[in-house]
Image (spheres, rainbow, N blue to C red):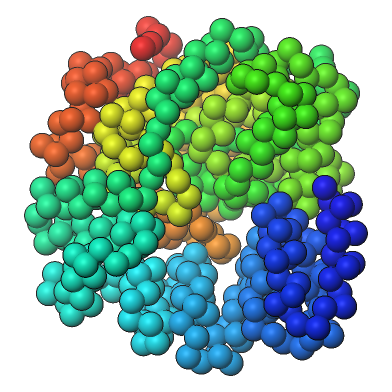
């Protein structure tokens, strides 16, 4: 694919305008070939000059390739030169939000709204740094827009999510929950519960553990931080990335895309059919493809520990353990009610079907728990169950244990993840800018009445008690009875 795109890119260097080249650049973006796209863009800029769309796409490349400061510099130049372009100001506000600069977010979001008062993303970002009250004119206008029905599904999802947060701050939790649930109706697809449960069932039946005997070489050191979204995966990433020997790959679909590509190449029809189909040459090819997506090779990865922080890679830990024989896995475990509530309250940028409703959320919680328990047994010393409660209540002790698990020496900087200097683009981007704290524990208690459907779907309070016993036993290092179902 890479060679093909390099050939295609040569054909677009003589275009008369950037608009003619942009569709091909978009295809490169879809295949995450940002390095190739950037080389094309740099040459096009020499010929065509600083076209705003061209420079904007250059900023996207630099951002995706990890040079966020260069991306920020380019977007600042675009926004200030175009002045009245709301999209440029919105993108710049989003970048500043990733860096945690609240004042810059406020200024850029207000600039965007000055030129486009209906820009919902800018309105949401402004609310995150300067919360609106119920009677604010912007919110009154938003309610009227939602009532007219003249918005896209994405806009409805954004609008209802913002209105829900405003009701939450005002203390009307029934109204807030109704709006959060309404938001999900527009923003998420339906979950195929049977398919998710079948994937975990086949995992338990088919996967028997890592297979280092298949690997011709062990590849780089890599740790996969997994679990459901909103379980503390970004917090742990921020802790680890402060270590001088850890390089984060962020959150991506690289592992899933590699698995899908392999299954397609072998014409495999069902999940886990790859177990019997994969061989040594396949492992090397898939590993190279995975690393290529991050502009890396086995050699350039060097002695650094790579960190892939993609929560739902949990379901692909078996595949990862075969591709990367030295891989380690940290499963983040957090109170299911806090996890469910946080997922319901979050308007994700990419679809997460299991967050659409409480029944789907319960299926996901139970299925991923069973997946984690199976991997814990089969991956053995390569798998660590990390309690979120333990991480925030006994911070230093837990960080020391994680570093020991990863064969990393102690680094004092890991105690201060709030000092992380790079951009954070996940839903937890604001929380990780704070010192480690316990504010994320027990948030569900405020919504206890509204969470009754979720509690029942999980299996009632007895099931939750069993989960608590399980999680706390992991904090103490005691092997509890297995929980299934």
Viewer-proximal residue, 371 or 441?
A: 371
Q: Is residue 208 visible?
A: yes
**Which residue is found at the position 67% from the left and 33% from the top?**
260
Rendering quarter of residue 363: top left
As drawn, is 469 to the left or to the right of 97? left
**Which residue is found at the position 54% from the left and 46% from the top?**
237
As drawn, is 35 to the left or to the right of 142? right
Viewer-proximal residue, 430 or 277?
A: 277
Viewer-proximal residue, 73 or 395?
A: 73
**Which residue is found at the position 17% from the left and 56% from the top?**
168
Q: Quadrant of the C terminus?
A: top left
Residue 83 in the image: state x and y as whole percent. Answer: 51, 92
Rendering quarter of residue 189: top left
As drawn, is 290 to the left or to the right of 401? right
**Which residue is found at the position 52% from the left and 20% from the top?**
199
Please say if 428 is above or below 466: below
Rendering quarter of residue 97: bottom left
Please say if 436 is above or below 448: below
Residue 84 in the image: state x and y as whole percent. Answer: 48, 90
């Amino acid at each position: 694919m890479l060679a093909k795109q390099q050939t295609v890119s040569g054909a677009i260097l003589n275009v008369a305008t950037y608009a003619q080249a942009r569709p091909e650049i978009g295809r490169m973006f879809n295949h995450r070939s940002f390095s190739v796209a950037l080389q094309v863009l740099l040459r096009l800029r020499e010929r065509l000059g600083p076209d705003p769309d061209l420079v904007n796409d250059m900023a996207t490349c630099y951002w995706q390739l990890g040079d966020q400061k260069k991306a920020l510099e380019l977007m600042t130049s675009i926004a200030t030169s175009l002045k009245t372009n709301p999209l440029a100001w919105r993108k710049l506000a989003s970048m500043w939000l990733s860096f945690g600069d609240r004042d810059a977010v406020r200024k850029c979001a207000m600039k965007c709204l000055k030129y486009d008062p209906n820009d919902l993303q800018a309105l949401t970002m402004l609310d995150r740094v300067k919360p609106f009250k119920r009677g604010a004119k912007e919110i009154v206008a938003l309610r009227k827009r939602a009532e007219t029905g003249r918005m896209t599904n994405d806009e409805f999802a954004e609008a209802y999510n913002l209105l829900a947060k405003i009701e939450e701050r005002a203390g009307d939790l029934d109204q807030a929950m109704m709006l959060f649930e309404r938001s999900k109706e527009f923003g998420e697809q339906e979950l195929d519960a049977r398919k998710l449960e079948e994937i975990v069932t086949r995992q338990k039946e088919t996967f028997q553990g890592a297979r280092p005997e298949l690997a011709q070489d062990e590849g780089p050191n890599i740790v996969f931080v997994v679990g459901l979204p909103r379980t503390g995966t970004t917090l742990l990433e921020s802790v680890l990335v402060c270590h001088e020997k850890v390089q984060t790959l962020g959150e991506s679909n690289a592992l899933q895309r590699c698995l899908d590509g392999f299954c397609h190449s072998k014409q495999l029809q069902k999940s886990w059919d790859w177990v019997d189909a994969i061989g040594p040459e396949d492992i090397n090819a898939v590993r190279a493809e995975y690393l290529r997506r991050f502009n890396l090779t086995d050699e350039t990865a060097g002695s650094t520990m790579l960190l892939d922080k993609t929560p739902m890679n949990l379901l692909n830990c078996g595949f990862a353990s075969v591709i990367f024989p030295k891989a380690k896995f940290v499963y983040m475990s957090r109170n299911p009610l806090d996890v469910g509530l946080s997922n319901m309250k979050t308007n994700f940028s990419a679809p997460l079907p299991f967050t659409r409703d409480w029944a789907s959320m319960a299926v996901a919680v139970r299925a991923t728990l069973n997946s984690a328990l199976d991997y814990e047994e089969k991956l053995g010393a390569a798998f660590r169950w990390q309690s979120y409660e333990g991480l925030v209540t006994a911070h230093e002790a837990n960080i020391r244990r994680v570093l020991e698990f990863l064969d990393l020496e102690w680094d004092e900087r890991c105690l201060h993840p709030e000092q992380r200097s790079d951009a954070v683009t996940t839903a937890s981007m604001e929380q990780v800018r704070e010192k480690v704290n316990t504010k994320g524990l027990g948030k569900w208690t405020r919504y206890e009445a509204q969470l009754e459907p979720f509690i029942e779907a999980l299996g009632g309070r007895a099931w939750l008690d069993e989960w608590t016993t399980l999680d706390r036993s992991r904090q103490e290092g005691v092997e509890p009875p297995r929980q299934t179902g």
